[in-house]
Image (tube, rainbow, N blue to C red):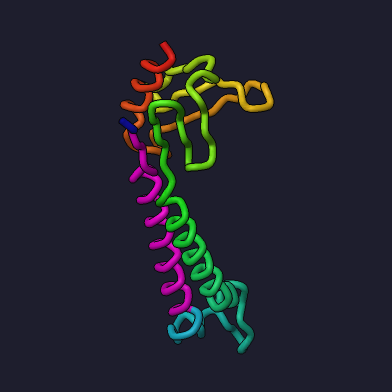
Amino acid sequence: MAIEAPISKFKKNNLKIYIAVCIVATVWFGYDGYYNEKFIDKHSPEGVPDTTLIFNQKSPPVFIGAAVLLGVYLFVISRRKVLADENELVINAREKIPYDSIQKIDKTHFSSKGFFIITYKDNSGSEVQRKLSKKTFDNLAPILDHLVEKIS
């Protein structure tokens, strides 16, 4: 039986909000910089545009680029997850932590701050700490319970 913790809705929703802000800024600054005659006249005395008008004309492509990059990042991270199966903990399908290599689990902050820290030995024998947070992954409580059960 494998327990899965997908990427959190908190993280996805924040990225969607950032994308929306970038799109709104693009429309707002683009309108003021190119179509709002009153704004253009106010910020170009004697026919020379001031820094505000220049910013409003040059920033929309930057905001659109940021929105596209954030959208690509959202698409990439939407497939990330933590998987606790019978033999190991798999984080983002890259990092595999066998249960026998886990030395301790610090869950003192899990109820108050929403994260726990796993200390384990990697393949080279060095001690590594990995922090898993509710802000990054949903459904971490069952994974923590499963880890504690497997370690005990």
Residue at the image position 41 percent from the left and 50 percent from the top: 79
Q: Give yes or no for residue 10 being in the magenta stretch.
A: yes
Residue 115, compared with residue 54, is above or below; it is above
Q: Residue furthest bottom?
A: 47
Image quadrant where residue 129 sits: top right
Q: Residue furthest top?
A: 152
Work out whether residue 49 or residue 136 is closer to the camera in this orientation and state it.
Answer: 136
Residue at the image position 40 percent from the left and 51 percent from the top: 78
The image position of residue 83, as x and y in percent, is 40, 35
Which region of the structure is painted magenta? 3-32
Work out whether residue 151 or residue 48 is closer to the camera in this orientation and state it.
Answer: 151
Quadrant where the C terminus lies? top left
Work out whether residue 57 or residue 94 is closer to the camera in this orientation and state it.
Answer: 94
The image position of residue 19, as x and y in percent, is 42, 61
Quadrant where the N terminus lies? top left
Residue at the image position 48 percent from the left and 61 percent from the top: 72
Left or right of 141? Residue 124 is right
Number of dots carrying numbers: 0
The image position of residue 146, as x and y in percent, is 35, 22
Residue 54, compared with residue 105, is above or below; it is below
The image position of residue 117, as x and y in percent, is 49, 23
Residue at the image position 51 percent from the left and 63 percent from the top: 69
